[in-house]
Amino acid sequence: MDHDEARAQARTRILDAAEKLFYDRGIQAVGMDELRAAAGVSLKRLYQCFPAKHDLVEAYLRRRDERWRAALAAYVTEHADDPAKRPLAVFDWLHDWFRAPDFRGCAFINAFGELGAVSDGVGQVAREHKRALLSYLTELVQAVPVRQPAPLAGQLALLVDGAITAAAVSGEPDAARHARSAAESLLAACAARP
């Protein structure tokens, strides 16, 4: 194995460990030495891959964003052939996610709550994630004949974040079902009239 390949593998192991530890326990509660041990790399290799903790935090959040949005989009595409049903399929996916034993809420809201006031990078990544989610929801509602798709997408984004937060705090996955019902009402109210 060459040097670049070894470094790439170490980087992946570090990000895997960071994703589990940061999401489970919070960013500030996890030290670099604990991350090093969990990833099975030397401290030197850890700092070669990520010179500072904030570099690792931002990389973890960017990778989580890609994975989270890809999983959501794949579910919606697979479970809703009809474009009119795709916005509601988002909430079905959320319900499945909320029932996972390792569900701890939105990694981006959690990270922003911990570090947003002191880390421009974390704030930027969290905002990028929320903008990307809004863009995806906008695409979904534009495929449905509705009036004013942009405001509707914004309302759906608020329902998504509200459901995630409610489920994390209450431990009740049915927050997704309640948000889905509200989304259904919004979609009906915004339906384009022939």
Image (cartoon, helix red, strand yellow):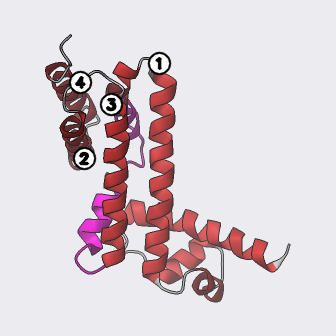
* Measured Cα–Cα span from mark 2 to mark 4: 22 Å
Where does label 3 land, which residue? 142
Q: Nearer the viewer, mark 1 or mark 3?
A: 3
> Residue beneath label 4, please?
146
Identify the mark at residue 81; answer none if there is no mark.
Answer: 1
Secondary structure of residue under mark 4 = loop
Q: Earlier in the sequence, mark 2 or mark 4?
A: 4
Label 3 is placed on what type of residue?
Gln
Instruction: Please state which of the two labelled residues, at mark 2 or mark 3, is closer to the viewer.
Output: 3
Q: Which element type, helix, strand or loop, lies under badge 3? A: helix
**Disc nearer the start of the sequence (2/3):** 3
Q: What is the span of residues highlighted in magenta in the rendered image? A: 90-119
Quick one: label 1 or label 3, which is nearer the N terminus?
1
- Rendering quarter of residue 110: bottom left
Which residue in the rendered view is the most extreme toward the front? 194
Query: Residue 37, located in which quarter of the rendered image?
Result: bottom right
Residue type, mark 4 in image: Val
Q: Which residue is mark 2?
A: 161
Q: Amino acid at mark 2?
A: Asp
Q: Residue 92 at what x, y percent from top left? A: 36, 29
**Circle number at residue 66:** none
From what the image shows, is residue 146 above or below residue 1?
above
